Each structure stands twice: as C-alpha cells, then as structure tokens.
Amino acid sequence: MVDKASSLAEQAIRILENAREAGYFPSASLRVFDRESPLFHYEMGDARADTLFDVASLTKIATSTMVLMAVERGLLALNQQIVALLPDLLGDNALWQHMQGITVEHLLTHSSTLPAWYPTYADGRDFPLMISTAILSQPPAEGVLYSDINYMLLGKLVERLYHLPLHQCLQQVLVEPLGLGQMRYCPDEKLDILPSGYGNPSEEQMCAQMGLHFDRWRPHTLLRGQVHDGNAWYYFGGVAGHAGIFATAIAYEKLMQHYLNTRSPLLVDSMREWAPLRGLGWQMGDLYPHGCGHTGFTGTSVYLSRERNIGCVLMTNRLSYKGREPMLTNPIRRAIHRLVAGIEG
C-alpha cells in the first residue's frame, strides 16, 4: 500500500505541476484517501493543509447530506412535495400550481424542471416574491437540468426541518457530529483563506444578456473570505444551500470518508443513479469512474468510489487570475480521478 500510495503521489503531483504551469490554477490542495485513512496529500502555490477554499457548489453536497440525515430521522420523506413543506415560501397561487408534483427527490437529483439560474439580487424582493418570479419567468426544463434554484430551496428546507439558521445547521447537524473541522459559512477573514476570484464579471454578463440591472457589483479586485457566487453573496448574505461554504480539503476528505464507511442504506443508495447521471446530490459519468462526486465553479471537486475503496478531494482557485478567461479544470479533474481509480492511460 505504501508503494502504491507513493506511485499515486508521484503521478498526481506531476499532473498538478503541469496544470499549474499551463495556467489552470495558481494554488491547489489534493488529498487522496481510502475509508480507513489518508493515503497522501499535496499542496502547491499558496495552499497549506489548513487553508480554506471557497468550495462553491460543493456546498450542495453538504446540503444534500443534511437533507438525507433528516430523512433518516423521519423528519420528511423523499417523495414529499416541496410546496407542502414550504407553503409560506411557495404559496403564490401561480407558483403553487406550477410546482405541483415536484418532490424533495426531484430537487436533489436536478430533475425538478426548475430553471438553472436566476440573479436573485437583481430582483431584490423578499424570498417568496423573488422565487416566484425566478421560476415562472423561465420555461420549465425537460429532464435533468443542473439548477442552483433546487438547492436554494433545499437550503430553506434544511432551516425549516432543524429550526435553525442554515449556518448553524451546518455546524450542529453536519460538522460537529461528523468531526469535519474547518467547514463554515462567512469565515473570519483573519483565517488562512485563498482568494477565489476577481468580482463577478461572468454574472455581470449574464445579467446584461437577461436585460436585468444591478448596481451593487463588487469591484474586479481579489475576493478573499467573500463567497464568489453572486446569489450567495448579494442576496443570501453569504449563507445559501447552493453555495457559500468555505472549507479545508481535509474537511471534505472526512465527509467523503463518511460516505465510504457509512452503513446507512439511504446514504449508500444516494450514490446510485436516481435520474440520468444524478444521485441524491451526486454527479455521475465519465468524470467519476466507478463512483460519483461533484464539482464547484471555483475549481473544486470531490470524487469517491465505494467499489474501489478510494476517493480524493481537489481544491483549486482557478478564478484567481486577473485579466484573462479562466480555464476549465475538468481535464485535470478527469486525469486525477482516473489515476485514483486505477485506470491506465
């Protein structure tokens, strides 16, 4: 096992160093592990073992896990309709009619027909009015459509189920019981936090394309300790179900090890395909050989395979280059995941 880990480490480090040289990211943290223990870790650039990253949509895995824990505790069922669970937030008559039949399972698997994205901050109204416009102003999707709106609603559902604000739910339901360590919303800026980008230029363009106006954009200077995602930052105050968490790679390693070790039938079942290439919170496909995982817009990703008893966490800050289009990190993720899974070539 030591020789195997050493060989994995050498090859993974070579991939990361080549990627950094090619300009995919300035800093990175990689951790590879099995269900019992870490196999190796490597940090480069300004990253250290205790560095916090803006994990972006890896927040969704924390949210989905809290929802699944609530199902296990009998607080709700996967087949319950979301309008029945959040009647005060989704009570607009037209929206209520529109969302009939949409269940918790549909939100978790992105098969709800809800739109992919909406600039909640450009609307600015209270949540019930905003979410009604966000959903009804766009045509229903067909099949599976990756949607931040699904997880905004699941974040609200988590708060309702546990009777706590979402940032407290994260700590009391997930982080403390599982001993995850450094995983939080709205971190103290005195902590070791890598910058996650330069303002929100891509969202500025998206709003312009939708004909929507917003006049409180952050300047195109480095964001450090402020969540990059515009909806999470401008509208939700940094705390949302779809984005907002800052964490170390170690924290997500421990969460992934929980999934590798769990005997919970529901958590195990969450990692199978419930909708095309979607588990209950998880992504599937060729990016995750023999397993599942998830990605984050800032350059983060997790991968695990119970079949092969292995997983990895890759944290980068790919958006932290000024004045040029960021590079998509999927080629690096794919190479690392295939290496970890033991796939040649």
Image: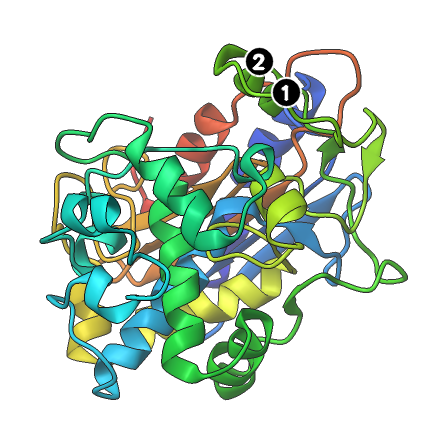
- Looking at the rendered image, the quarter that the C terminus falls into is top left
Residue visible at 23% across and 61% down?
82
Residue visible at 20% across and 69% down?
268
Residue 211 in sight from this viewpoint: yes
Q: Which amino acid does label 1 sit on?
A: Glu
- Looking at the rendered image, the quarter that the N terminus falls into is bottom left
Tell me the element at label 1: helix
Pick whichever, 5 or 216, lies toward us. 216
Query: Residue at label 1?
Result: 204
> Is 141 left, or right, of 222 in this rendering?
left
Tell me the element at label 2: helix
Q: Which amino acid does label 2 sit on?
A: Ala
Residue extending furthest toward the right: 190
Q: Which mark is residue 45?
A: none
Residue 262 in sight from this viewpoint: no
Residue extending furthest toward the front: 93
Quadrant hosting residue 181: bottom right
Pick whichever, 281 or 99, lies toward us. 99
Please state the horizontal and vertical placement of residue 218, each as a whole percent of the image: 79, 32
Identify the image's colour scheme: rainbow, by chain, secondary structure or one colour.
rainbow
Pick whichever, 26 or 123, lies toward us. 123
Quadrant hosting residue 22: top right
Please state the horizontal and vertical placement of residue 126, each as a whole percent of the image: 53, 52
> Is 83 left, or right, of 177 in this rendering?
left
Q: Residues within 10 Å of mark 1 (few under 14, many from 20)?
A: some
Residue visible at 29% across and 45% down?
283
Asked if disc 2 and disc 1 are in contact, CB closer than 8 Å, the reply is yes
Query: Residue at label 2?
Result: 208
Quadrant hosting residue 69: bottom left
Please state the horizontal and vertical placement of residue 114, each as a whole percent of the image: 26, 39
Please state the horizontal and vertical placement of residue 46, each as a whole percent of the image: 82, 43
